[in-house]
Image: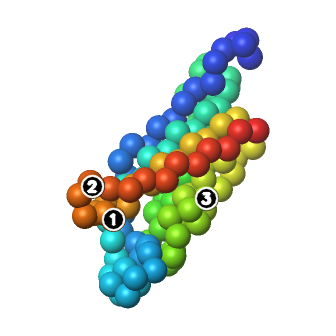
Amino acid sequence: MSSTQPDAIIRIKNLRLRTFIGIKEEEIANRQDIVVNVAIHYPADKARASEDINDALNYRTITKQIIQLVENNRFSLLEKLTQDVLDIACDHPWVSYAEVEIDKLHALRYADSVSMTMSWRK
């Protein structure tokens, strides 16, 4: 398999979690709903011709790490939460690009959510 193939893209879509996010008293006292979307690009050269999980990026492992981070921590800023999730998304040496978008639901009165997007490129 030639390495001129475009990267494979893993998308974790609409991962719905609850965490402490914000600086207002109510936000510090109560968990809030967030929605996490992640895109991870990697060559997948081995996985294209294999049935071995060790030749692929394991999205279950990545998702479990994100869940553990989000549910077991408190965040004042959406920026910090987004960066911490991005750090998990781009941790594997095969990753060439990662993007994370996190929506804080009901953050503004007349909006469905406020979101933050951050990306990383090797």
Residues under numbered marks 2 and 1 in contact, where contact means CB atoms less than 8 Å apart? yes
Report the residue that reaches farthest toward the front.
110
Residue beneath label 2, please?
111
Q: Which one is in front, 104 or 40?
A: 104
Percent of width and height locating residue 56: 61, 35
Label tally:
3
Task: Provide the residue designation for mark 3.
Answer: 83
> How dense is the environment of label 1, judged by Cα within 10 Å: few (below 14), some, or many (20 and up)?
some
* Gap between marks 1 and 3 measured at Cα: 19 Å
Q: Which residue is mark 1?
A: 107
- Residue 20 position, x and y percent, is 42, 76
The secondary element bearing badge 3 is classed as helix
> Does residue 99 sit above or below 111 in this rendering?
above
Contact, mark 3 vs mark 2 (Cβ under 8 Å): no
- Within 10 Å of disc 3 (Cα), the crowding (few <14, some 14-19, many 20+) is some
Horizontal placement of 103 versus 78: left or right?
A: left
